[in-house]
Image (cartoon, rainbow, N blue to C red):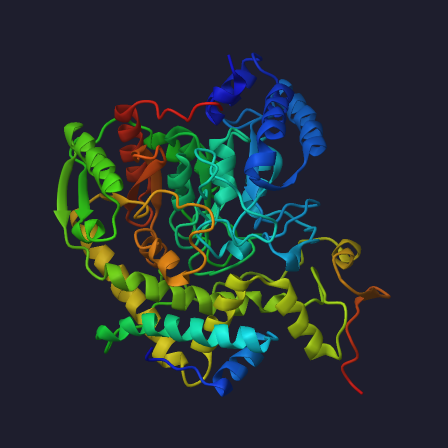
Amino acid sequence: MDILDLTAVELAAKIKEKEVSVLDAVEAVIKQIEEKEEKLHCYVTIDKEGARKRAEEVQKAIDAGTLTGPLAGVPVAIKDNMCTKDMLTTCSSKILGNFIPTYSAEAVIKLEEAGAVIIGKTNMDEFAMGSTTETSAFGVTKNPWNEEHVPGGSSGGSAAAVAADECFFSLGSDTGGSIRQPASFCGVVGMKPTYGTVSRYGLIAYGSSLDQIGPLAKDVTDCATILEVISSYDVKDSTSVERKDTDFTKALVNDVTGMKIGIPKDYFKEGLDPDVKEAVLAAANLLKEKGAIVEEFDLSLVEYAIPTYYTIAAAEASSNLERFDGVKYGYRTEDYEGLHHMYKKTRSEGFGEEVKRRIMLGSFVLSSGYYDAYYLKALKVKALIKKAFDEAFAKYDVILGPVAPTTAPKLGSSLAEPIKMYLGDIYTISVNLAGLPGISVPCGLDKAGLPIGLQLIGNTFEEKKLIQTAFTYEQARGKFEKKEGK
Amino acid sequence: MANIISDETIEYVGILAKLDLSSEQIEQAKKDMGSMLDYIDKLNELDTEGVEPMSHVFPVQNVFRQDVVTNGDNREQILKNAPGEKDGMFMVPRTVE
């Protein structure tokens, strides 16, 4: 048995049965990291010694019977925008290049309480702004399926680390598709829950009204299990939602009989790669064969989601990123004349180009004279987009479509044309605007052998329908074969 | 391009954003912001008369909790992250002459 072939849930079961020790699992991952990391660069920080030490503690607690959960002893990687106490947390930015948090994010604490072992922090687009992980200040991550291609973003390191077996699962964050799109590009399962389900406490904010933490995993069972562990009502996050139905693993049921699935016609128009289209429609057919009722419908407003999103996200980012001023933490410029010059020079040197572009845009749309025309207008369109989804979910249990219009683009081909890159978010972004849950499940390969993702979208608080549909699809699809030469 | 960003506007935005841009970066920022605004102008195709702006997807407002200290004294660890520190405080450049 190769430990690395196990899913997170299978590994925890073997650890419980004493067939595998926690240290065996940690050493297997470290060995894989030592073989793969130089080429792929999934991580910003790797804490081998910390993980080994923690493995011993967790093993003791498992042996003593105090740790019995479904993730006890499983090595995990955390996106580098979630605070980890005493472990470097950079957001892949020079401006936080030396930041050591004094506390951990609530989602990280939940994983630690469940006995997961943190291996390290994964690479990302700087401050989660990007779709390729190429805006990281610490170098690009490569797609494990083909190293000439990007892993997607912004949680590119988290997705690539799972795909390359450099961890058993990871956490990512999703503001406009940043979990689902890299999951799609790397052939893993990724899920963004309903806004408010996972506490954002300790998640370094990008667009606060859109950000959600979620799992990237090897299969739907792992995904549901992780989400169940990290979901919590948290008074430290004022947007946290108190809900009682977070027993997501109960929805791992192989049955879609009578499930009403809607396919937005607008998601299959121009710009969609034919291979992606074919694979996604084949997945829909498979669900139909399993008893689901599948129909096409008009979702409307699809082309307005991207301009709405970039207005709102940039506005919130410009406000959230004000705190990086060279006073309390992070980078400070060397030479300056007075306080204001220190602020400006620190920020100009500490932030990368894409981050500065969004801060500028956000500052503009919030400035007096333009606030109504841009920011307020976007909030109104957001209300219309939410309404369009409400109408769709009056008719359907689940919406089905692609995650992204294409498979993973080549390294270096995206950043030169920002708007073209933003267009790649067209199917994921409205889900964040409306606060909905969405999941990405591998559904095929394109002609070049790169993974394609199927996206399922649910109404707010209806993760269980998504998980049930995704699980049923996964069972019908069979094993998603990973690339050769793992 | 419909949106022409003037030098005054970009200077003003630079002040709001607290960014120090070189003349080259200013030209690029003008171009980038102009094309982004052209794109965002697409929203004007929609009639939003009478639509309530939605800042939060759930009707949640003013979430309060008791103002009770729950964390310990982390001053030393917190100051370790500061670029400048003196006598248990953050050190900043002189602000009053």
Q: Nearer the viewer, residue A52 or A181?
A: A181
Q: Quadrant of residue A473?
A: top left
Residue A93 lies, in percent from the top left, at 61, 56
Where A60 sits versus A115, above or below? Answer: above
Q: Is residue A440 left or right of residue A231?
A: left
Q: Nearer the viewer, residue B2 or A390?
A: B2
Q: Quadrant of residue B56?
A: bottom left
Residue A371 lies, in percent from the top left, at 41, 79
Q: Residue at x 56, y 27 (%)?
A: A72
Q: Residue at x 72, y 31 (%)?
A: A49
Q: Nearer the viewer, residue A7 or A32?
A: A32
- Residue B56 shows up from this direction: no
Q: Quadrant of residue A325?
A: bottom right
- Residue B3 shows up from this direction: yes
Q: Is residue A202 left or right of residue B78?
A: left
Residue A340 lies, in percent from the top left, at 68, 79
Where A271 sits versus A286, above or below? Answer: below
Residue A380 lies, in percent from the top left, at 30, 71
Where A201 sits versus A321, above or below? Answer: above
Q: Residue at x 69, y 27 (%)?
A: A52
Q: Is residue A158 left or right of residue A383?
A: right
Residue lying at the far right of the rendered structure? B87
Q: Is residue A185 left or right of residue A161?
A: left
